[in-house]
Image: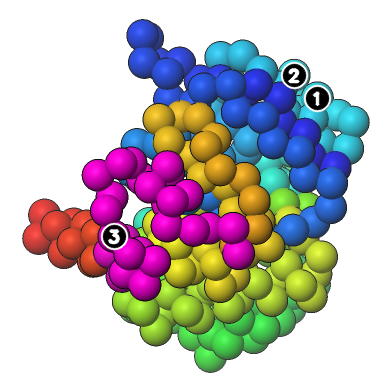
Amino acid sequence: MLSIDALTKRFGQNIAVDAVSIDVDRPAMIGIIGRSGAGKSTFLRMVNRLSDATSGRIVFEGRDITALKGAEKRAWQAQCAMIFQQFNLVPRMDVVSNVLHGTLNRRSTLATMFNIYPDADIHRAIEILDRLGIADHAPKRAEALSGGQQQRVAIARALMQDPRIILADEPIASLDPMNAQIVMDALRRIHEEDGRMVIANLHTLDTARRYCDRVIGMRAGRVVFDGTPEQLTTGVARDIYGADARFSEEATSTAIETLDRERVREAEAAI
């Protein structure tokens, strides 16, 4: 289904992603874990073709994705939807219009300029919002919603593309625990109910264990673990996060979650 062979990304002398090879033979929910700077985000951006690989191949159902250009590349990006940590919504635009932006790849330039949407697309956008529990917020500006609600709007926008694959780049890193659970529950339901492949960059071992069928650990751009959640032992965690990550099995998730909270506090302080 999806085959990634020796995918590499260089920035000058620095190697962000180093010969990563992954095979996925069926739709699954896959978590990618690792420290900041491990290459997780760069890897997802290459799969989506937001960033070109330096070398290696991405093949989906026999099609070489790394070779696509122009309209074919844009069509792939519709099939392989991307969800970001910072939501990437239009703050002053209403929620339903933000969701309808998921159809931009198949609309004419004139329709895009004047925000003209078919009734069928509007109804579908509201149905998706209802599925995610936020249909009541459809007429509100996106900026009026909480972070967790905005992330669900971003998921709804991705679903408007009717993608085969959803890539989520740290979708809960800036959310409180309750909203993080709501967002992860939504992604898991989308995988199970729709049969879509979901690949999510995650920061906590606990989240990966709870929601994912398969977990991939990255360190310094390379895959150092690829297995089931049950195989995520303390020793494996040290391989992924480094030898200095000296914590017990019970404390593993707590330690990483504490790092996440510290990152959020630092980000909020910088605003």
Left or right position of 226 against 87: right
Residue 261 at least partly seen = yes
Residue 30 at least partly seen = no
Category of crowding for the residue at label 1, using alpha-carbon neighbours closer than 10 angstroms: few (below 14), some (14–19), many (at least 20): few
Residue depicted at 46% across the width and 29% down the height: 221
In the image, the segment drawn in magenta is 230-257
Q: Distance from label 3 to label 1 (Cα)?
A: 42 Å
Give the mark, 2 or 3, whose residue is nearer the N terminus. Answer: 2
Name the residue furthest right: 62
Q: State the residue position of label 2.
A: 67
Q: Are marks 1 and 2 in contact (CB under 8 Å)?
A: yes
Residue depicted at 64% across the width and 51% down the height: 227
Going by the numbered disc 1, the residue's amino acid type is Asp
> Mark number for residue 247?
3
From this view, report whether residue 124 is shown above or below residue 76.
Answer: below
Category of crowding for the residue at label 2, using alpha-carbon neighbours closer than 10 angstroms: few (below 14), some (14–19), many (at least 20): few
Residue 82, how many percent across, how many down?
Answer: 58, 50
Q: State the residue position of label 1.
A: 64
Going by the numbered disc 3, the residue's amino acid type is Phe
Name the residue furthest left: 269
Name the residue furthest bottom: 136
Quadrant of res 155: bottom right
Quadrant of res 86: bottom left
Residue 131, how many percent across, how many down?
Answer: 67, 83
From this view, report whether residue 93 is shown above or below residue 32.
Answer: below
Point out the image quarter for the N terminus.
top right
187, 120: nearer the viewer: 187
Q: Which element carries disc 1, helix, strand or loop?
A: strand
Q: Is residue 212 magenta?
A: no
